[in-house]
Amino acid sequence: MAKPQGAKYRGSIHDFPDFDPSQDAEALYTAMKGFGSDKESILELITSRSNRQRQEICQSYKSLYGKDLIADLKYELTGKFERLIVGLMRPLAYCDAKEIKDALSGIGTDEKCLIEILASRTNEQIHQLVAAYKDAYERDLEADIIGDTSGHFQKMLVVLLQGTREEDDVVSEDLVQQDVQDLYEAGELKWGTDEAQFIYILGNRSKQHLRLVFDEYLKTTGKPIEASIRGELSGDFEKLMLAVVKCVRSTSEYFAERLFKAMKGLGTRDNTLIRIMVSRSELDMLDIREIFRTKYEKSLYSMIKNDTSGEYKKALLKLCGGDDDAAGQFFPEAAQVAYQMWELSAVARVELNGTVRPANDFNPDADAKALRKAMKGLGTDEDTIIDIVTHRSNDQRQQIRQTFKSHFGRDLMADLKSELSGDLARLILGLMMTPDHYDAKQLKKAMEGAGTDEKALIEILATRTNAEIRAINEAYKEDYHKSLEDALSSDTSGHFKRILISLATGNREEGGEDRDKAREDAQEIADTSSSGDKTSLETRFMMILCTRSYPHLRRVFQEFIKMTNYDVEHVIKKEMSGDVKDAFVAIVQSVKNKPLFFADKLYKSMKGAGTDEKTLTRIMVSRSEIDLLNIRREFIEKYDKSLHQAIEGDTSGDFQKALLAICGGED
């Protein structure tokens, strides 16, 4: 496959030097002759040749032996290895045509395959695919897709199949604004959805134009286009439109995500894995590898190695082209990719929104009476308690507590503690506390008894604002008659203690960025990182990460990337260890994208065997009125399932009911 004029080649497979198609044809014939076949020789040869060279080998094989090489390979090989090798032997357009034919054949349709191919291919690739399908099967691809799909999903597939997306990089600002308005009116502002507008704009505008549309849409509406698509569309049509958006933003990131999902969890989706590794090996495999390593903190190579076996594994690893974990470092370009992945969210000034809001027509007297009734007599009416507590703001809950005491001469918190138990009690009591006293209690619990919950200390102190930290200090002193600093000093040690105490002062600068100072800070980190002095490195990081403002730190991270070609987070993970590393990583991730930081924490609290109810409760309570709606959006974007679904699948009973009420909706 020829690379574009002047473009840097980003494939992992290159033309083989001193290529001799006749010699290769003979080698393959020998490898398949006699009893059994030499699979090692076959995979070594085929994965070391470019697609253009493989076509020449096919021609030479037919000339020399009067036989079809692909037919012989199919006869000699079996299973996944055979599918992979045969896929490599076809030109990309014919490989895509075969995948789509298989997706449309038999009972049911493989919509995911149709979406992946048609959402990601360029105009030229689409035209070649349509011609290859006609040539290979003597059928019209558009007619076959119309015959096998329906509705808006079908309409969008047909639009993509035309291969007529605009390719002009000159973008009209007026048209961008018009498209933003049209999309907004077609979805958010309309009763029902005007799907035709979504199809027309997302199916025809150039990628450059659409990227600007997405940026402006976020600024205008306060939500990413993906959130509107999820809210307004459904089923396969929704999945197709989300795939188009992802490919517009970054085709390589789309495929990195598809590869990760093909291998995570139980079982491997081999058809997806094969299709992507074959189709991207001469296009953008290096970009996919970089993004994969950055996004999932492991190399594509290592994941393939752990998830596959035999000759199939060897062939896939050859297509991958290298292990980005081998030297413990990213590609130089990967840090730039890392920065781009969160820079937009940092600049976009996204409005932060909680899921719990003040109740309309609030009546603390009625609420206090309803809660008293729910706890009086035999048994407890948990449903009423959950309904009231989760649908009132924290200020309103404090009014209810006061009214309850005035009416009944009783402490509402004590009554709730007596009537509820377990996870539900911790959740409801947490909601009834003011945020500062709740955080103070969580910090106290993290330092109580045998062992310290360092993760809880880090999560709270690394993410709270100066005002929140100062309020926590006062609450801690009031509740436990000891300063938070003294408690941290008694329970932690070394650099980790110094980091926590620095954060607990609540003296982070609050101004904007200072570019000159940011360059100096980045240079200091870079110089100290290369010195090999771990103590100096930790001290320098603490001085900068614990005191500079968030906008300033974002600029420091950007300058650091320019100077070193590494993301600062990667340097921390490479050079540091233990609680110090975890604390610095939490600060960096919080600076980059705080809702995403909490989305990751929530996901980890529910994945695998068992649930970390303490972390789940702490985050749901503490973020419910701050940014839980943003956390929800980050959660579904990263993990391809909603926070609502994760809670439903991992919790039960009244605890689940209360969590889902705080979650505030299904995305």
Image (spheres, rainbow, N blue to C red):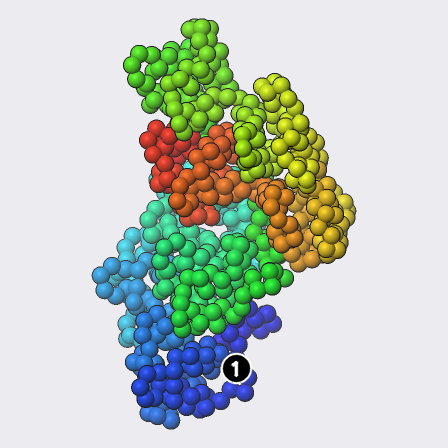
Say which residue appears at 33% left-offset and 23% top-offset. Answer: 383
Q: Indicate the amino acid at tag 1.
A: Phe
Identify whether 353 is placed above or below 53. Answer: above
Q: For the C terminus, which image quadrant?
A: top left
- Quick check: 169 left or right of 99? right
Q: Nearer the viewer, residue 81 or 358?
A: 81
The answer to which image quadrant residue 230 occupies is: top left
Q: Secondary structure at mark 1?
A: loop
Residue 210 in the image: state x and y as whole percent.
50, 53
Residue 522 visible: no
Going by the picture, which residue comes out furthest to the left? 107
Side of 216 where 557 appears, left or right: right
Where residue 157 sits, quadrant-wise, is bottom left
Q: Is residue 565 left or right of residue 460?
A: right
From this view, report whether residue 88 is shown above or below residue 405.
below
Question: x and y percent of residue 257 in the render?
Answer: 46, 56
In this rendered view, identify the residue nearer to me: 254 or 173.
254
Residue at (25% x, 61% y) in the render: 147
Vertical side of 52 occupied by 179: above or below: above
- Left or right of residue 381, residue 597 in this image: right
The residue under the point 36% across, 45% down is: 233
Instruction: Say whether residue 293 is visible.
Output: yes
Q: Residue 86 appears at what percent x and percent y?
A: 36, 76
Residue in the image at 65% along x and 45% along y: 554
Give the number of callouts.
Answer: 1
| Residue ranking furthest to the front | 450
Residue under numbered circle 1: 16
Depicted 96 relative to depicted 381: above or below:
below
x, y percentage for residue 474? 63, 21
Badge 1 crowding class, 10 Å Cα cut-off, few under 14, some 14 to 19, many 20 or more, is few
